[in-house]
Amino acid sequence: MIKVKICGITNLNDALDACSLGADALGFVFVKDSPRYINPADAGEIIKKLPAFVTSVGLFVNASIDEVKKSITRSGVDILQFHGDESEEFCLQFNRRYIKAFQVKSHFNLVECCNNYNSAAALLLDAFSDSARGGTGIIFDWNLIPQDSLKPLIIAGGLNNENISLLINQHQPYAVDVSGGVEITKGKKDFKKMKEFILGVKHASI
């Protein structure tokens, strides 16, 4: 079954709604200039109330070592997700599994990414944007997704309940990651959209 991550969680109600609908993981954005930013301590209070078997993910973009360490301590996230220019050496030093995200554009070389981040738990493929590292609501060219990968692939970028079945039918990724596609406004989730999205993933995965 394809896993579902709901990213950009900013409040307990949205977190518990996502869990009740069957989300496998929740993403917390620790990037201060993001409209979906949440203080790591506030994220920690939410994470303490999550049911068993739901994974919490902390998202960073070119954060300092000290910032990442403090965020881990204050939030207690299970997995780290790096969206910046972090090296494998940087990602490895926090005693946490990690996901390395890449912005996909023409001539994207997944083999090189796998080689450069061999220690990653998964690779996340997102749309390229000059203005943001994720959360853009833009779809990238799915034809650039390789059929065979040495690493589990998480697909993000512009996903919603209307296109998720097409993506899964074409590519069968390990997981999908959605944020803006299930929101009322940035940082506030829509229960109906989350339900339709998760049901769409489950039906397409059968």
Image (tube, rainbow, N blue to C red):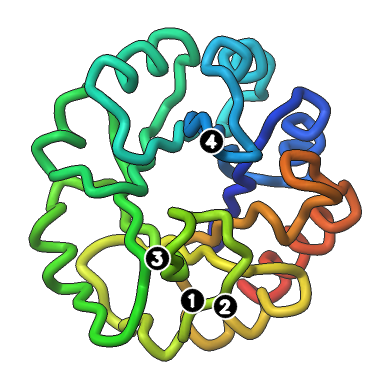
Mark linked to residue 189:
none
Q: Amino acid at mark 2?
A: Ile
Quote the CA–CA distance across marks 2 and 3. Answer: 14 Å
Comparing labels 2 and 3, the label whose residue is closer to the camera: 3
Residue nearest the observer in this picture, 31 or 120: 31
Q: Amino acid at mark 4?
A: Asp
Q: Left or right: 55 with respect to 98?
A: right
x then y, percent, for residue 84: 31, 47
Relative vertical location of residue 66 with respect to residue 38 in this rendering, above or below: above
Residue to which mark 3 is pinned: 125
Q: Left or right: 93 with respect to 24?
A: left
State which quadrant residue 94 falls in: top left
Residue under the point 58% across and 71% down: 138
Q: Are marks 1 and 4 in contact (CB under 8 Å)?
A: no
Q: Residues within 10 Å of mark 1 (few under 14, many from 20)?
A: some
Residue under the point 36% across and 34% down: 80
Quote the CA–CA distance across marks 2 and 4. Answer: 32 Å
Lower position in the chain sequence, tag 2 or tag 3:
3
Q: Residues within 10 Å of mark 4 (few under 14, many from 20)?
A: few
Residue to which mark 1 is pinned: 172
Quote the CA–CA distance across marks 2 and 1. Answer: 5 Å
Q: Left or right: 127 with respect to 192?
A: left
Residue to which mark 4 is pinned: 33
Q: Left or right: 169 with respect to 198?
A: left
Disc 4 is placed on an element classified as loop
Comparing labels 1 and 4, the label whose residue is closer to the camera: 4
Residue to which mark 2 is pinned: 168
Q: Quarter of the image containing the N terminus?
A: bottom right
Lower position in the chain sequence, tag 3 or tag 4:
4
